[in-house]
Image (tube, helix red, strand yellow):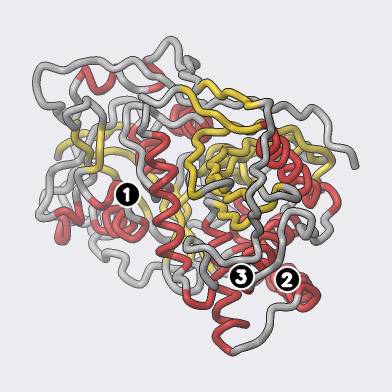
Amino acid sequence: MKLKGKKILCSLMIVSLILIPTTTALADNDEAQEKEKLYMLDDVNAESPIKVVIDETEAISQDVYTIDNKYGFEADLSIVNPMYLFEENSGKVTSVLNNHTKRTIVIDKGSYQFINQFVNSYLDTYVTKNMPDMDTYYELSNNARMQNKLSVEAFVFKDAIVKSNIVEDIDYTINISEVTPLSENISEILFYLERTFHTNEGDERGGTWFLTQIANTVDDYKLLNVWIQNYEYEMMQNTFKNKYLSKNIELDKNTIKQDILDEYEKIQDNNSSKLYIESLNEPNDKLGNNLTVQPRKTTLTYDREAVGKAAKQYAYNYNSLFVAQSLDCTNYVSQCMWQSPGWGFDRIGNNDSVKWACKKNSANKYEYETLSWVGVNELWTYLQTNDSPSKAGTVYGISATTSGYNASNVQVGDIVQFYNGNIWRHSVIVSEIRNGKPLCAAHTDNQSEKPLQDYINSYSNYRVAHINNFITSY
């Protein structure tokens, strides 16, 4: 099926928010801090585009240059730790987001067209639900390149077939953000693919960073590596290592495809009985369970509508009030919760596990002060224990319920975390309930309205934190 409405916009979309200077350190309910929030801003659509110059010469070096070699930046997946690779490459994304001085980049016309062709093939999988064939983009001259090609093909195929809705068509925008030469005739190109899936149940938006090495050879343009900033992609690489490479089993495309289909069928069969993770450490002296606890005197309501709106607004346009983080999912979730009117930072408690705060740096941007702001497990620990007087000491900050909620009763503004089989790896926030189905917003594979069920289908398990209110005092 033909992709319609394609548009290529070579610019980095960065939201420029009004920064209100403060004369003193921000208190938890400081008026200046409150004025920085989305619901107080009149205009959040300002952009600071990076100018991209397309070099029309398409000059190809006459030097003999083939891609039969294995280059220093290529490595077999069997000897690579996908988590470290993810963190390293996510750092390059962060560097771009925090770099406001570089305003002009140059990309040759051939590479520009090559990226467009690759994106077309990549997205066509979501329409056809067929396993992609990227042979045309790769010259499979070494094992590392073969593994990279198959991991990309397997990831996009799995991601396509687990989607809840039938994708009818796709609009997309490519934001090329940086070109860094690796060596002669090889460019490392970082670009952001923002996409809209037109489905039988409405539109679904998403966005993903890609890091590609493109070789300009004497014959044609070729890919050496592709990396995708998506935790599911990291999981696919881990699956390859654990299921195939560690057992010296050769990667075979047909076998991989069948494994993905079998896994999806199993998920569909077991979905009705798949349970969320109940917390084993839920405090037993939470308010409501222990009447001897002193009643709260002052709380601030959690404005789910404001938080849901902010989650969608900042899904693709990073909140420029904050320092971008390389692993951004929980950082983004915290920023969204903070957008509830009146909510401040929590710096009160016995230790950092019951605090949740940011501080401003010398550039007047917020950066995390406590790990609970940016860490998956650290945020969960904070939400789980902060509402317990015996554990938190002076109870203050976010009140949350960390058991009793799942996909059937989750609400807008609630936090959902996912387990990848080894660790709790990803946090998302519910941005909308549409026709009874929860939709989620996230960073690190940017989404504004991704069905919660799609995440559940992709991960081993999940847990929900239902956000109640913000406690200011007793």
Q: Marks 1 and 3: in contact by CB < 8 Å?
A: no
Question: Is residue 446 rendered to the left or right of residue 131?
Answer: left
- Residue farthest along the bottom direction in this orientation: 247
Give the residue at the far top of this rendering: 42
Instruction: Find the distance from the CA under tag 3 to the CA under tag 2.
Output: 19 Å
Which residue in the structure is indicated by mark 2? 260
Q: Amino acid at mark 1?
A: Val
Determine which quarter of the picture holds residue 144: bottom right
The answer to whether 251 appears left or right of 227 in the picture is right
Dot 3 alpha-carbon crowd within 10 angstroms: few under 14, some 14 to 19, many 20 or more? some
Q: Which x, y percent locates residue 17?
A: 38, 19
Badge nearest the viewer, 3 or 2: 2
What's the residue type where badge 2 is placed?
Ile
Estimate the x, y position of residue 195 in percent, counting from the top left. 67, 37
Above or below, 44 relative to 257: above
Instruction: Name the one closer to the observer, 58 or 147.
Output: 58
State whether residue 142 is above or below residue 383: below
* Distance between the alpha carbons at the discs numbered 1 and 2: 32 Å
Q: Secondary structure at mark 3?
A: loop
